[in-house]
Image (spheres, grey):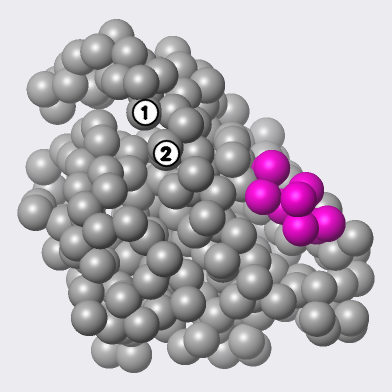
Amino acid sequence: MTGVVVLQHLEHEPAGVLTDALAAGGHRADVRRLWRGDAVPGSTARLAAVVVLGGDMNTDEEEDAHPFLADERRLLGRCVADGVPVLGICLGAQLLAEATGGSVAHGVPQLGYLPVDVTSAGRDDAVIGGWSAGAPPFSGHRDQITAGPDAVVLATGAATPVEAFRVGDRAYGVQFHPEFDATLVETYVDGPGVRGYLRAGGCDPDALVAEARRRDSAHRLLGEGLLQRWLHVAAVDRDPWRGTWPG
């Protein structure tokens, strides 16, 4: 088995469907629970791949509240420079954008199952190209990405200019949540402060859970497909020296 570092920011936003995709591909997940004080790797030397999950903090809140955000940004920059595969999800995508010359700005919350439009570049992409046209993934963000100068925008949304992007051949960021299934939506909704956040953004939490249950099978298939395609592009099992268990 190969090891993939997964950086998790909050207890109520775990890896979800990603865990199944990793297991199906024979990969081990080295989950770093950052809210508990687990360390962000300081080097890429022994990393097979890195996944950065979402979180309710913003990228500009590093200081005393979330000092690990600065560490993550540095790690992502090193991963891109060293060719280590990366998948940034929501907050992870925002950090990847900042690490590669882009920026993040606060905006209007985008909550629920919202369609994304794959760009012409995205249709030719090995990861995003397999996404069903118009299929609505789960979204739970309010910050907006401006992609960096070397990034290729792969998908957009009605109110989200950058839904997915790629930097180089092996670093991907997605604003939506391919890792969410209905169970994870329920866990997320019951997290600290989430119901209030959803209501303030015009989203009824119980209606969201009900919709997640209705969409569960289709959304799992979409998410699993995207995650498996990323693992194939990451090719962590084809490069033995990167398969060393990360320290």
Question: What distance separates the C-alpha of mark 2 from that of mark 1?
Answer: 6 Å
Q: Is there any visible trace of residue 62 in the rendered image?
A: no
Taking depth in this image into account, of 144 and 98 the one nearest to the observer is 144
* Residue denoted by label 1: 215
Q: Position of residue 3 (x, y in %)?
A: 82, 61
State the SS at label 2.
helix
- In the image, which residues are magenta? 19-27
Taking 205 as reference, is 83 above or below it?
below
- Magenta stretch prevailing secondary structure: helix
Judge left or right: residue 231 versus residue 226. right
Q: Is residue 26 magenta?
A: yes
Q: What amino acid is labelled 2 in the image?
A: His
Report whether residue 175 is seen: yes
In this image, 218 relative to 233: left or right?
left
Q: Is residue 204 magenta?
A: no
Q: Which amino acid type is shown beneath numbered disc 1?
A: Arg
Q: Nearer the viewer, residue 159 or 10?
A: 159
To which residue does mark 2 refer? Answer: 219
Mark 1 secondary-structure assignment: helix
User: In which image quadrant can residue 57 be found?
Assistant: top left
